Amino acid sequence: MGWKEIAAHLKISARTAQEYERERGLPIRRQGDQKKSRIFAYEVELDAWMASKLATRDSTDSASEAVEEQSSSAYELGLEALPPDQPDNINSPTRRQWLKRTAFGVGAGLGLSGLLIALDPIIWKSHTSPTHVRIDGVNVVASGPNGKEIWQHAFPARLDENFYNSRPDACVLADVDADGCVEAILIHSPADRSIGPTLVCLEAGGRLRWEFRPGRTVTDDRGRLFSPPFWMSAFALLPARHSSHMRVVAISNHNWTFPEQVTVLDAASGGLLSEYWHRGHLNHLAVANLGSNEPTVLLGGVNDSPDYKRATLVAFDHRQIAGSSYSRRGIANFYGFPRGSELCRVFFPKTPISEREEFNRVTRIQVAAGRIVVMVAEGIAEVDTPYMVYELDFQFRPLAATPCDTLYARLRAEGYEDVDQFCANLLNGIEVL
C-alpha cells in the first residue's frame, strides 16, 4: 500500500501520515535505502502503532494533540484556525468567524469520535494477546488467559478436528515480526482429504495474513516428474536473521510417493526463502541447541534411494537449509538443485525384523540431557511396529542402542540370546556422513 492507502486505513490525510512518519515513528517500510524508494506498510503494524499512541497518551498530550489535529484538519478543509496561544475574546468574532469556528469544532469532534469508535476494537485486541487456539467446525477461535474469545477466523470448509486434537504442535502462537501483536501460524487441514493442507498465518483480529501451499513439480535423477499436491506434515519457528522477522521451517511430502520438500519461509510475509528436496520422507522435526549459539534443525524419516533404504536423521544449521539429498557418488537426487547443505546425515542399520521390509524409519526425535534420542521403527509403518531407541551425542556419535520390549522378545525368539552384544553391533553399524 502507498501513502493514499495508508492514510485511508488510518482515516487521516496523506500529508498527516507523512508527518506522523517523520515526527512520531509511524511504521513505514521502504523497498531499498533511498528516501524516494517505494513505500509500503503492514496493516497490523499500523493498527498497533495507532492503538499504542491512543492507549499511552495522557490527558495533557490528548489536549495538545487535539489542537494539532484541529489545526491540520482546518488547514486541509480551507478553514482559518486560530493560533493556539491567541485568546478567543480579543475582539468579538464576526458572524463569518463564528460560523467557521462552529463548523470546525463540530467537524473535528465528529472526526475524532469516529476515529476512536473505529479503533476501539483494535485498542482492546492489541492489549489482549491470545494464549490458546481451538478448532470449531470451520472456525479457528483464539482466546486469552481468561478464556474469553479474542478473535476467530472462518475457513470455507470444515476443519479436521481429529488432526488438531492429535497434533498440539499444529498451531503456534508467536509475535513473528516483533510488532507487539501475537500471530497464529497453523497447518490448515480441512476435513475433506481431497484438499491438501496448507500453512497459514492469522494476525490480530483473525485476519488471514498469508497462506503457503507446499510443493511444485520436480524431476528426480531418473527423469521422473513429481507434481503437487504435497501434504504439510510439520513446522517450527526459527529465530530472525537479518531482520526482526522470525522464520518458519516446514516439511511436506508428496501425496503418494517419496519426494519431501523442506521449506524456509519469512514468518511475517509467508515468502519462500529457501528449500531442500529429499529422496524419501522426513516426517519428523525438531529444533534444538546442540551446544552452540545457533539452533540445529533435525529431520527424521527415511532415505529410500537404492543407495540407502534406511532410517535417516538429517541435520542442518538453521541459517542454511537448501539443495537436494544426494547419492554416495555425490549426485543430487533432483535436477536443478545442488548437493544439500546438511551438517550431517545419519543412517541407522536394519535389524533382522526390518531386513524383511523395504526399509526402517525414524518416528521420533527428542533432545534431552545432552543427548539426541531417536526412535526407529523396524518396518515401513510408523505405528504398531517394534522399534529401537538410539542415543547420540551432540556431535552425532553413537552412544547407546536399546530395543523395545516387543523387539527384545522377538530377537530372543529368533535365537539372539546375547541382545546386549547385538545392540553393540548395531551401534557399529550406524553410518554418520
Image: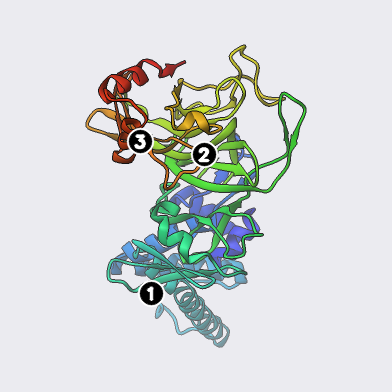
Q: Which residue is label 1 attached to? A: 87
Q: Is residue 408 left or right of residue 337?
A: left
Indicate which label's residue lies in the foreground, 3 or 1: 3
Q: Indicate whether 64 appears above or below 106.
A: above
- Counting residues from the start of the chain, the first of labels 1 and 2 encountered is 1
The residue wearing badge 2 is 380
Image coordinates for residue 4, horizontal then vertical, percent: 65, 59
Tell me the quarter of the image containing the N terminus: bottom right
Helix, strand or loop for disc 1 = loop
Which of these two is toward me, 416 or 168?
Answer: 416
Confirm or deny contact between disc 3 and disc 2 (CB under 8 A).
no
Which of these two is toward me, 107 or 8? 8
Residue type at mark 2: give it.
Ile
Residue 13, by quadrant, is: bottom right
The earlier-in-sequence mark between 3 and 2 is 2
Q: Give percent across and percent down for residue 420.
A: 26, 23
Q: Amino acid at mark 3?
A: Arg
Say which residue label 3 marks: 410
Label 3 sits on a secondary structure element that is helix
Q: What's the distance in space between the residues labelled 3 and 1, CA to CA?
A: 97 Å
Q: Nearer the viewer, residue 129 or 230?
A: 230
Q: How is the image coloured?
A: rainbow
Q: Residue 225's x, y, as percent? A: 76, 35
Label number found at residue 375:
none
- Name the mark nearer the viewer: 1 or 2: 2
Residue beneath the point at 43% across and 17% down: 432
The residue drawn where x is 31% and y is 71% is 147
Q: Residues within 10 Å of mark 2 (few under 14, many from 20)?
A: some
